[in-house]
Amino acid sequence: FETMIFLLKGLVGFNTICLRLGRQLAWIAIGLMVIIILIQVFFRYGLNSALPWPDEAARFLMLWMTGFIAPSAYRWGGFVSIEMLFRLLPSKMVKIVTLMLLMISLLVLVVGLQLGLKHVDSGWLFSSSSLKWPLHLIGMEATRVKLAWMYMSLPVGLAMMTLVNVELIIKNFLWLWNPNLELPIDPDQPKRDGS
C-alpha cells in the first residue's frame, strides 16, 4: 500500500498542475470566444458586413475550452450523476459500485482516446474553410488551419480525464480497503455548500 500511496501522491500532484493550467487556458479560450462573437455581432449587425472567420474561430475555442475544463469537472464530481441508488446501499457496497463504474469509465475513456487520436490523424488531410494562420504579417503566404488542430481538443481532454479516472480508481480502491486512510486531495477543489 505504501507504494500505491506514493504513486497516488505523484499522480495527484501531476493532475493538479495540469488541471490548473487547463482551467487557465479554458478561461482564456472562453474570453477570446466572447470577444470574437462580439466582433462578429458588430460587423454583421452594425456594419451589415459579416466576417467569414468568427463563427469557426469561436467553435474552435469552444472545443478547446471544453477539452481543458472537462477533466477538472470530472475530478470534482461536476458531471451529472444519479445518486438515488447510492442512498439505498450500505457504504461498503457504494464503494464497490463506484469502483466498478470507474473501471467501466476507464474503458470508455481509453476507447474514446484511441478514436480521438485517429480523428486527429484524419484532420491533417482537411483544412478549415475560413481560418488561416496570419503568416502574411511576417511576409509569408497565409495558409489555412488544418482541422487536426481543432480535433486535438478531444484526445487532450480525454487523456487528462483518463489520468483523473486512474487517480479516482486508486483512491476508491484504497478507501475500500481502509476507509480511514488519509489520501492526498486536490487543493483546488471548491468547497461545497454545507461542508
Image (cartoon, rainbow, N blue to C red):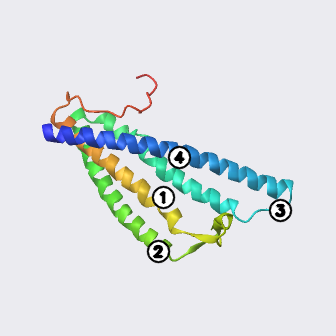
Give whichever of discs 3 and 1 has the lower sequence position.
Answer: 3
- Position of residue 138 relative to residue 93, above or below, is below
Residue at horizontal 81 percent and vertical 58 percent from the top: 44
Give whichever of discs 2 and 1 has the lower sequence position.
Answer: 2
Q: CA distance from mark 4 to mark 2?
A: 25 Å
Residue 73 point in image, percent of width and height = 44, 43
Say what amino acid the circle numbered 4 marks.
Ala
The residue labelled by disc 1 is 153
Report the disc number at residue 122.
Answer: 2
Pointers 3 and 2 in contact (C-beta within 8 Å): no
Q: Quadrant of residue 187?
A: top left
- Position of residue 176 relative to residue 61, above or below, is above
Say what amino acid the circle numbered 1 marks.
Ser
Say what amino acid the circle numbered 2 marks.
Ser
The residue labelled by disc 4 is 26
The answer to whether residue 171 is visible is: no
